[in-house]
Image: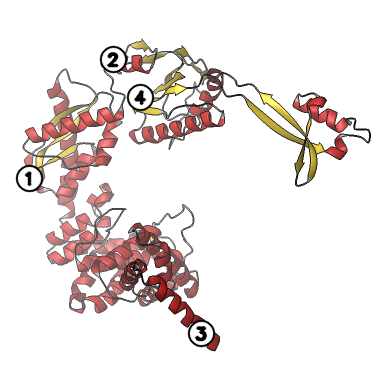
C-alpha cells in the first residue's frame, strides 16, 4: 500500500467555499478508486483559505486485473452449417482483440450467443491518478468561479501551485499552466518560503516550521480556547456560535485572538444591532456578562501573531467605531418619526408584482389577524390590529435598509419609542418567527397571530398567482412558512379551523389570484399535509399512524397531533391486533350491507 497526497494552493478562497470543496474531493476520490478497482482507505481532508488537502494513508499501487465479458451475435449467425466461424464471428473476435478459437457460448433470454472474455491487466495507480487529477481540480463545484486573462480554466481564486505525491514520488501533471510537483509554500506573511514534501508526516512537520495550522479541527480548538480565555479575562463570556467559529476558522492559517474595546455609549443601541454589526459585518465575537448583557468589548481573530498587537487592536476598534457611528446615525434619524409615519411609504414597496405592495399585504394581514383574534382572544382585537398595521413599517426605515436582518426587531424598538403598548411592540418584533430551522417561536399570543396571518397570506397569495413550490424551487419559502404556521398553532394549542382560516385568507386575496379557488385550496392543502407529515415523522411518530390520521383531514391542527400520538400509543399495546381485526370485520360487514 502507498500513500497519496494532494495540496491545491491558491489565493485566499472565500470561507464558505472550502469545506464543500473538500467534501466533494473526498467523495470523488473515493468513487474514483472504487470504479477503477483500486483498494484505498478513507481519504482525510484538511484546508485553510489558501490550500485544500486530501491524503490517503493506504492505496494499492496497481489496479486489480479484471475479465470483461462481451456478448456477440447469435450462434446461428456466428457459425455456418459445418460449424465454421462466419464473418460475423471473425469480426466480433477481431473487435475484441481475441482469437476466434477462444470464443465461448452463452445462453441468454434471446437465445444462445457467442461470448468473448477479455482479460484487462491492471494499470499502475500513479498513471491513472495523473490522468484523473486535472479533471478533479477542474470540476470542484465552487459557488462562483472566476477566469483570469492568463488562464483558460475558471477557479474560485487564482491557483499558484499543486503538490501531488504517490508512494513518496511526485505525480506530475499539468493544470492550466501549473505543473504539479512536491513543493508547497508557508504562511503568506509569517514564513512564505517554499518547502519540499516527502510524505504527509513530513508535510505536517514542515507546516509547523512555516507557521501553518492546516488541520481545521486543531485551528477551531485553538480559536475557541483563545476566545474563551480572553473573554474570561474581560470579565465575561462568549455565547456558543458554531457558524461564526466555522466562518472564522477558514479565514486564517494561524489564528491569534485579540481583544478590542468600544465606547460604552454605544451600549445604548439595541443589543441585536450591536451583535449583527460585530458578528455579521466584522466577524467579531461579542462578549457578554453573567446577566446576558453586552460588555463594551469584542474579540477578533488575526491571521498571525502581531509584532505590534496594539496596532491590530486599534485598527479593528477604528473599523467597528465607524460602523457603530453609522448605526447610531440611522437609529437617531429613524426615531425622529413615529412608526406610524413610515406606514404610508409602504405603498411604494412592491411585495410581489402580481400581489401588489407591502401596504396592500399589511391590509390583508390586519384583516386576517382580526378574524383569528375573534376566535382566539377577542379582548385583544384592538392591540392585534394595531400591531398588524405597524408590523412592516420598519421595512422603509434607514436602519432596516442598511441591516435587513433587523426587520421586525427594529420595528419593536421603534414602537416602544413611539409610545405603543409593550405587547404591541413585542408582537411586531416576533411576527417573522420562526424565520429558519431551529428558530424560536413568537413569545406571545399577539405575535403568534400576526405571524400566522402573515405567513398564510404569503402562501395563499403566491400559490394563487401560480408560484407553486416544485422540487428544489421555492423562492418565496412557502414550505418554511407552512411549517412555521404548524409549529405556532401547536405551540399555542389553538383550536381553530384550518379550512375556515384558509377560506378567509382566500377571500382577501381572491381578486389578485390567477388560479381558481378550488385549485388554490388543493395546492395549499397538499403543501400543509406534506409539511405536517415531515414535522410529525421528525418527532418519531410512525408513518402509518401519521397517514392514517391525516387521511381523515386536518381541520384541527392540534387534534391531528393528539390523535397521531394516541394511535401510536395504542399500536404499542398487546391487544391492538385483536382490536384491529374486530374493526376490520365490522367494516366488511357494513360495506356488504351498504
Q: Residue at x 30, y 63 (%)?
A: 487
**Which numbered disc covers residue 50?**
4
Residue 314 is drawn in which quadrant?
top left
Q: Taking 294 as reference, is 149 above or below it? A: above
Q: Give the residue drawn at x 20%, y 55%.
A: 410
Q: Position of residue 590 (x, y in %)?
A: 50, 85
Out of 281 and 546, give the one closest to the viewer: 546
Residue of label 3: 589
Which numbered disc, 1 or 3, marks the residue that appears first in the sequence? 1
Q: Label 1, on which residue?
A: 290
- Pinpoint residue 491: horizontal percent, then vertical percent: 25, 65
User: Dot 2: what SS?
Assistant: loop
Q: Secondary structure at mark 4?
A: loop
Which of the two labelled residues, at mark 4 and mark 2, occupies the earlier sequence position? 4
Q: Position of residue 581 (x, y in %)?
A: 45, 75
Mark 1 vs mark 4, foreground winner is: 1
The residue most toward the bottom is 593
Residue 468, label in figure: none
Q: Residue at x 25, y 70 (%)?
A: 493
- Residue 131 or 383: which is nearer the viewer? 131
Disc assigned to residue 210:
2
Amino acid at each position: 500500500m502507498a500513500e497519496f497526497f494532494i495540496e491545491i494552493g491558491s489565493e485566499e478562497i472565500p470561507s464558505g467555499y472550502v469545506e464543500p470543496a473538500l467534501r466533494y474531493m473526498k467523495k470523488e476520490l473515493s468513487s474514483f478508486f472504487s470504479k477503477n478497482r483500486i483498494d484505498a482507505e478513507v481519504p482525510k481532508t484538511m484546508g485553510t483559505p489558501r490550500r485544500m488537502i486530501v491524503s490517503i494513508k493506504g492505496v494499492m499501487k496497481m489496479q486489480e486485473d479484471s475479465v470483461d465479458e462481451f456478448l456477440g451475435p447469435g450462434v446461428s449467425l456466428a457459425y455456418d452449417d459445418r460449424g465454421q466461424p462466419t464473418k460475423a464471428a471473425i469480426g466480433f473476435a477481431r473487435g475484441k482483440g481475441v482469437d476466434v478459437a477462444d470464443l465461448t457460448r452463452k445462453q441468454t433470454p434471446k437465445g444462445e450467443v457467442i461470448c468473448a472474455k477479455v482479460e484487462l491487466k491492471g494499470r499502475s495507480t500513479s498513471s491513472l491518478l495523473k490522468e484523473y487529477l486535472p479533471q478533479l481540480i477542474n470540476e470542484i463545484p465552487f459557488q462562483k468561479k472566476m477566469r483570469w486573462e492568463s488562464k483558460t480554466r475558471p477557479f474560485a481564486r487564482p491557483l499558484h501551485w499543486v503538490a501531488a505525491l504517490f508512494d513518496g514520488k511526485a505525480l506530475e501533471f499539468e493544470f492550466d499552466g501549473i505543473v504539479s510537483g512536491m513543493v508547497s509554500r508557508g504562511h503568506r506573511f509569517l514564513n512564505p518560503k517554499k518547502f519540499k514534501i516527502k510524505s504527509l508526516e513530513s508535510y505536517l512537520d514542515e507546516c509547523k516550521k512555516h507557521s501553518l495550522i492546516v488541520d481545521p479541527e486543531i485551528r477551531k480548538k485553538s480559536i475557541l480556547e483563545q476566545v474563551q480565555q480572553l473573554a474570561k479575562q474581560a470579565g465575561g463570556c462568549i455565547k456558543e456560535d458554531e457558524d461564526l467559529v466555522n466562518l472564522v476558522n477558514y479565514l486564517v492559517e494561524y489564528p491569534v485572538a485579540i481583544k478590542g474595546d468600544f465606547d460604552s455609549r454605544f451600549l445604548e443601541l439595541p443589543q441585536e444591532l450591536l451583535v449583527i454589526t460585530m458578528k455579521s459585518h466584522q466577524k467579531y465575537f461579542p462578549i457578554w456578562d453573567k446577566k446576558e448583557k453586552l460588555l463594551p468589548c469584542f474579540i477578533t481573530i488575526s491571521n498571525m501573531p502581531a509584532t505590534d498587537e496594539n496596532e491590530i487592536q486599534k485598527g479593528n476598534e477604528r473599523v467597528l467605531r465607524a460602523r457603530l457611528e453609522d448605526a447610531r446615525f440611522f437609529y437617531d434619524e429613524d426615531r425622529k418619526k413615529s412608526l406610524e409615519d413610515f406606514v404610508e411609504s409602504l405603498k411604494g414597496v412592491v411585495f410581489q408584482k402580481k400581489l401588489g405592495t407591502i401596504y396592500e399585504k399589511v391590509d390583508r394581514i390586519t384583516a386576517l389577524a382580526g378574524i383569528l383574534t375573534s376566535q382566539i382572544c377577542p379582548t385583544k382585537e384592538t392591540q392585534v390590529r394595531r400591531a398588524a398595521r405597524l408590523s412592516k413599517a420598519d421595512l422603509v426605515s434607514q436602519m432596516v435598509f442598511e441591516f435587513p436582518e433587523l426587520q421586525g426587531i427594529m420595528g419593536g424598538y421603534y414602537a416602544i419609542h413611539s409610545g405603543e403598548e409593550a405587547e404591541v411592540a413585542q408582537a411586531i418584533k416576533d411576527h417573522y418567527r420562526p424565520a429558519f430551522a431551529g428558530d424560536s417561536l413568537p413569545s406571545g399570543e399577539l405575535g403568534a397571530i400576526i405571524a400566522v396571518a402573515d405567513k398564510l397570506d404569503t402562501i395563499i397569495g403566491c400559490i394563487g398567482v401560480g408560484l407553486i413550490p416544485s422540487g428544489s424551487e421555492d423562492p418565496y419559502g412557502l414550505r418554511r412558512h407552512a411549517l412555521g404556521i404548524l409549529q405556532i398553532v401547536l405551540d399555542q394549542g389553538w383550536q381553530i379551523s384550518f379550512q375556515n382560516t384558509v377560506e378567509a385568507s382566500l377571500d382577501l386575496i381572491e381578486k389578485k389570484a390567477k388560479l381558481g379557488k378550488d385549485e388554490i385550496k388543493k395546492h395549499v392543502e397538499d403543501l400543509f399535509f406534506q409539511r405536517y407529515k415531515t414535522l410529525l415523522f421528525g418527532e418519531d411518530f410512525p408513518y402509518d399512524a401519521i397517514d392514517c390520521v391525516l387521511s381523515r383531514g386536518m381541520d384541527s391542527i392540534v387534534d391531528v397531533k393528539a390523535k397521531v400520538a394516541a394511535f401510536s400509543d395504542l399500536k404499542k399495546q398487546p391487544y391492538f391486533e385483536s382490536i384491529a381485526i374486530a374493526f376490520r370485520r365490522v367494516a366488511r360487514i357494513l360495506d356488504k350491507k351498504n
